[in-house]
Amino acid sequence: MKKILSIILCIAMNFAVCIPVNAEDSKITVTLDGNEVMFPDAQPFVDARDRTLVPIRFVSEAMGAEVDWDNNTRTVTIRKEKDTIKYTIGNAKAFINDEMVVFDTYGIVKEERTFVPLRYISELLYCDVDWDKSARCVKITSPGAIEKFPEPEIKVNFPESEWDRRMFWITLENAREFERECPNYEYKIEFISPIEFNEFEQDEGAIVGWEKYNRDEFKSLTLTDNTIVSVGRAFYSTRENMKKFKPTEGMDVSYKLTVLRKCSGEQREYTYTEKLSLPYPLIEWEE
């Protein structure tokens, strides 16, 4: 969801280490800020799911983390600053500070070494990961200095399946960067235009009936959910608004993001405008 050392990336060094190769079966090179990570025995490899697995101790220690192995539970524990990551071999999930994160592959023990998915572990440690296919080189980049208010990386998402009942949803792609400095940030999106997106109604059944909700409210994010706001294809506004307002393909959607740093009470505001995409029709409702 996705940066642990205060090392400045040297681009020239990165490219100097990752040299293109011809053989598909040549070894995989791993670099950290342009410096090659050395593996004295067991080497990184690509698994059947096309994920790079590495001996976790050498990579984590290169990033300044401590690594412990519990042979009884087959669990590796990685500690760095305020973060603790626990991963049990054979599982497709890990826990960071007791919050579960799901992977799409799993770690193994091979040649008496513990191998884990490199990208997921690195990103949990705030690092960026890039794969140079021609050079068979994984380039890990450590984060820069910790910032009080990192620049938000906002993404407007649209459904890729008609089964997805959302019209669009807005995510904060670098939510983890905010947590490095203060674990108590909250976020709110207020729609400037169309303002009809700021509230919606939903039928809660025969007993409760129709209820109104506001979208422009502060919320905290988690490792597994970085969605600040979501707008559905059915109840995208109130019933009254939906009678006279219909979203259209290509219309401008303007909104304001407010970031609240609860550690100090400070707030910052950012404004954005995006084009609305409607790959699937709105879902009609009946009164």
Image (spheres, rainbow, N blue to C red):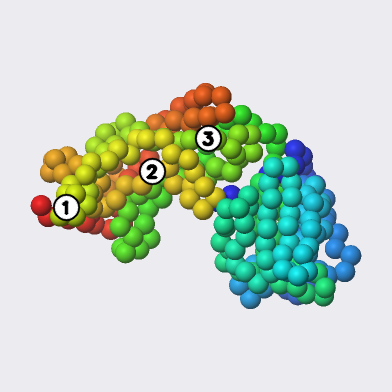
Image height of 49 relative to 242, above or below: below
The crowd level at tag 3 (other Cα within 10 Å; few <14, some 14-19, many 20+) is many
Say the numbered circle drawn on residue 65: none
Reading the chain from its start, which is encountered first: label 3 or label 1? Answer: 3
Kindly state the secondary structure of the residue where label 1 is placed.
loop
* Label 3 sits on residue: 185
Q: Nearer the viewer, residue 284 or 74?
A: 74
Asked if residue 195 lies left or right of residue 93, the reply is left
Residue 1 image point, x, y percent:
55, 51
Residue 164, visible in the rendered structure: yes
**Disc number at residue 229?**
2
**Dot 3 lies on which element?**
strand
Residue drawn 32% across and 31% down? Answer: 192
Choose top left, top right, bottom left or bottom right for residue 73. bottom right
- Marks 2 and 3 sit apart, C-alpha to C-alpha, by 15 Å
Q: Please state which amino acid type lies under the numbered disc 3.
A: Tyr
Earlier-in-chain disc, 2 versus 3: 3
Q: Residues within 10 Å of mark 2 (few under 14, many from 20)?
A: many
Numbered badge on residue 207: 1
